[in-house]
Image: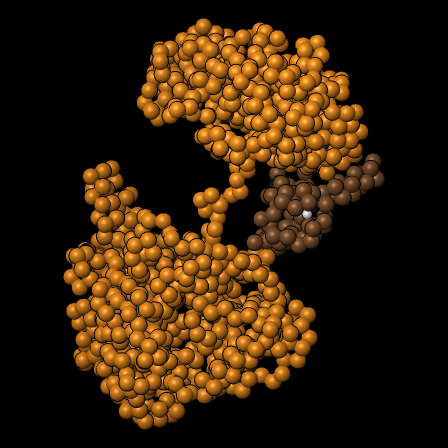
Amino acid sequence: MKRLASGGRIERSEKLSVSFDGRRLPAVRGDTLASAMLAGGLGTVARSFKYHRPRGIYSAGVEEPGALVHLRDGDRHEPNVRATTTEAFDGLTSGSQNAWPSLRFDLGAVSGLASPVLGAGFYYKTFIGPFRQTTRFWKWCEHFIRKAAGMGRGTYRSDPDAYEKRHRTVDVLVIGGGAAGLSAALAAGRSGAQVLLVEQDFALGGALLSEPVGHAGDAWLDESAAELQGMENVRILTRTTAFGAYDGKTFGLIERVSDHVKAPEAGAVRQRYWQVHAHRTVLAAGAIERPMVFGGNDKPGVMLASAARSYLNRFAVLAGDRVIVATNNDSAYVAAAELAGAGAEVTLVDMRERIGPELDELINGAGVKLLLGHGVLEAKGWGRVRHACIVPVDAAGRAIGQKTIVPADLIAVSGGWTPAIHLWSQIFGKPVYDAGGACFVPDAKPEQHIQTAGTAMAAASMADVIEQGFARGSEAASATGAKGDCGPAPVGLDSGRFWQSDFRKTWAVFNLQGKTEGTAFVDMQHDVKLSDIDQAEREGYVSVEHLKRYTTQGMATDQGKLSNLNALSRMAELRGVQVPDVGTTTFRPPFTPTTIGALVGHEHGRHFRPTRRSPIHDWHVEHGAEMTESGAWLRPWYYPEAGESLEAAYVREASHVRAHVGIVDVSTLGKIAVQGPDAAEFLNRVYVNGWKTLAVGRLRYGVMLREDGFVLDDGVTARLAAHDYFMSTTTANAAKVLAMAELMLQTAWADLRVHVTSVTDQWGAIAVAGPNARALLSQVAGADLSREALPNNHFTRAQLAGVPVRIHRMSYSGELAYEIYVPSRQARQVWEALIAAGPEVNLRPYGTEAMGALRIEKGHVAGPELDGRTTLKDLGFEGLASSKKPFVGSVLRKRDVLEDPDRPVLVGLEIEGMSGAKAGALLFPAAGRTEGHGDGWVSSSTYSPALDRHIAMGLLKNGASRRGETVRVVDFVGNEVLTARVVANHFFDPEGERQNG
Amino acid sequence: MIRIECPVCGQRPETEFTYGGDATVRRPEMTNEDPQAWIEYVFMRGNPRGWHREYWHHVQGCRQWIVLERNTLSHEIGQAELARDAARAWSRTSEAAE
Ligand SMILES: [Zn+2]
């Protein structure tokens, strides 16, 4: 392993500080972390998932199964990153994972000795097999698995970086910046279409970058890239992965904006998540080389032939000095010749008995030793490859002669190619099997919006790749209406002419007994051996879906990019059927692992959803209120005085309301303008009670049901004018009620002349409650608010601090109370005018906690009682329902199951002792076992300052006939049992004298 | 991400809409007191394979309810019309049938 003195697409003069496990690597600009590791002579860079076997660098791309490392330290620590796709940068620190105490000496490797136990189906057998009901064994296993298995560890620190999302619509999306993608983008760009070209690498070129420097491809690449960069209608995004194809021709891309620097520059994002809507897409994602299966094929020193070629030609790293190239097809011959040309001693081991004269000439000219009809049976060496065991093989890969052992430090393998069809398959499902190439390709149909080109479509030569790319790009552009002249197709390049041709469909090599020698892996990331596939077959897990779950093949972070076809082929062989009869794997996003941060973007913390603020919000904050979340709203919870606790504050505030007067911000109530000649008829249909008789200037409480007969919401509606009603809903249900009203008015009731409009944000609302409420308002509003002039359930218009307002006389707290409706812009002004006038009547603001205590004292229902499971009857509202008219839910509320007399109904509970009940606690009779769901539950609970005791509301079976009974209140979560007396839910001032005063 | 051609607002992403259920069931007349009719309307749903008509609410847009054709097999999106227009057409056909 060494860096060559010349060649490669790297900047030797620009040295970068890059380290792995504290060791400095000889990295230069243009390297990946993997190429720097190879240049630095590193063999083992990781330990495997299950058996902790040493693993090295196997590939030069996204398919990497072994070289998973962690990057950076501290809060930017990132686990499970493929070294092969990590661009080297100055200041890059990286380290090994899944090894203890060190990468070289990993104690976990002893689990390799237990590998017969940890084979296919281990998880299932351990947990349901002979060890069932042996808890101790179970726990031992769990401990073992959790400690041993797995990959890197994440960090618990919060991510310091910013991410963003962008949306874009394009005519043509080209995925892949290799020869096919560049050709497609050229054709589409020239025709005038809006083109987006994305490439996951930091450089354009794809496989062309693995050709030797000075190859004809270089000039072609430079010219094509320059032409594209000169087109205003073409945008190129490098370092960008198209990870998913979604419905509606939408694609998800991740652009790694700042991953190639130590930390994002000030103000820059780390990654950008693009949602691209593309009318047509050309998928030119290339192909991934297929491994060979033999003993020790996972050892450091075994590598894909194409990767050895990439490291040589792109990074000027010779990955071995004594190289065995093992293949079953033509494509590895160029790699063998080039490795020999760079000074390695190369033996080419080909499972085929015959090759064409062209290949023969190439190999002879390069000084490569050729062994036809042979395969590598085993890679030998402790910790890394030191020898290769070579045998003559038959057509099925079985040894037919004696083995020879030759020294080797690199075994470069090529088992053919697997087109990267993932994004096509995510949308269009099952691909078709190309028997010639022994691979799956898209089942292309002209109407599909994703067309595949190049080696992703198993194109046979570079000329085909370019021709396909150009044709698909041109078709895509014209399908979107682009009419420009595409010009001539690029001239074909001659490289890669051996690709995918004439290959032997055998991937595994067996000894004379028909077994693999040593441990032969199919899935190197999840440590799935060939013998695991065999075992799954013996045990009946023969379909691809069973095979996958039983062995976990293809379920690691590489999603089986290297292993799927070899696993399918083995199963087909064992069953004596063709590969497509075994099935194909389902491709799902993401194509490569994606950071959650990029998908989240800015939508976290405070920006997770919009925060709704009342127009008086700032006053509350300025005056020390503790705020609480109520849905998306922020509301004042309580106003602590001199370090008061929540408990002390709400008790003081609620007591103050009953003794003097308080104001509370109720702007969050849902408000809906219901307008039109048929408004009363509309209200009659949505509410259970009647509305035809409500006079202008009056208010009425109403309850509405869902279509299925359960209670939906309650609130007060005012008749402002003949055809103009002002409906209020609970804070939580405002959106639901409006959506239902709109559905009805646009469908079943389209004949009603009614408009509903949300006016929640247009109106602030302030409740003024307490014995001094009238005195306060009379003073500041200058209106006659006497009992005679403004009785309960009436409203009047007035001027308050020069602002026109509506004063509704209604009470939630049970005190003499008013609600003031004021245009939002003046809400704070009115609130402050009330506060300013406050001292004379001893006015204090109160928060939602005190408001809740006051409403429970009065036995009013709220969110906890309107939970979607309660009926009118359950809540004691039966009398409210009109029998003279139909309304939403009027028929289904009478279903037998909802009329069942055993249903829990609303009751009050006086708690004995000095601790309060927990909402959600279950109710049980005074004696007997506390099992099951009990006779009901506690819905709302508070300490009542007015009664000086803990009270609660709840729903209790046969509650109406159980008044006076003592029940147990059992909190299974807190393991607490209280006793309570069942009472009516109107605890305080049941006659309502105070509010009518 | 599906895109819906709102008859009012044009093509918009699905994130602006909420799904509103089966648009092939018809609400009984208000005066209908037969529980079975309401049970059919509220609870009984087919599970068709292929093209289906569904309510979608352009809740972050024009607030119109839309009847959208969606293929439950391919997730393909077809025509969209205002639920108001669909309801009108429906009542015309049922009147004609009477
Ligand atoms: Zn719309």
Q: Which chain is brown?
A: B
In the drawing, does residue A424 fall left or right of residue A396?
A: right
Does residue A647 show up? yes
Residue A340 locus on image (x, y percent): 28, 87
On screen, A505 above or below A931? below
Quadrant location of the N terminus of chain A?
bottom left
Quadrant location of the C terminus of chain A?
top right
Residue displayed at 49% across by 25% down: A847
**Total marks drawn?**
0
Residue displayed at 24% across by 79% down: A2
On screen, A390 above or below A877? below
Does residue A718 show up? no
**Quarter of image, res B84:** top right
Q: Colour of chain A?
A: orange
Residue displayed at 69% across by 35% down: A757
On screen, A588 above or below A947? below
Colour convention of the picture:
by chain
Residue A546 locus on image (x, y percent): 38, 54
In this rendered view, identify the residue nearer to me: A306 or A795: A795
Residue A410 locus on image (x, y percent): 25, 77
In the drawing, does residue A883 fall left or right of residue A247?
A: right
On screen, A10 above or below A651? below
Residue A770 locus on image (x, y percent): 55, 14
Residue displayed at 72% across by 38% down: A746
In this rendered view, identify the residue nearer to me: A341 or A675: A675
**Quarter of image, res A351:** bottom left
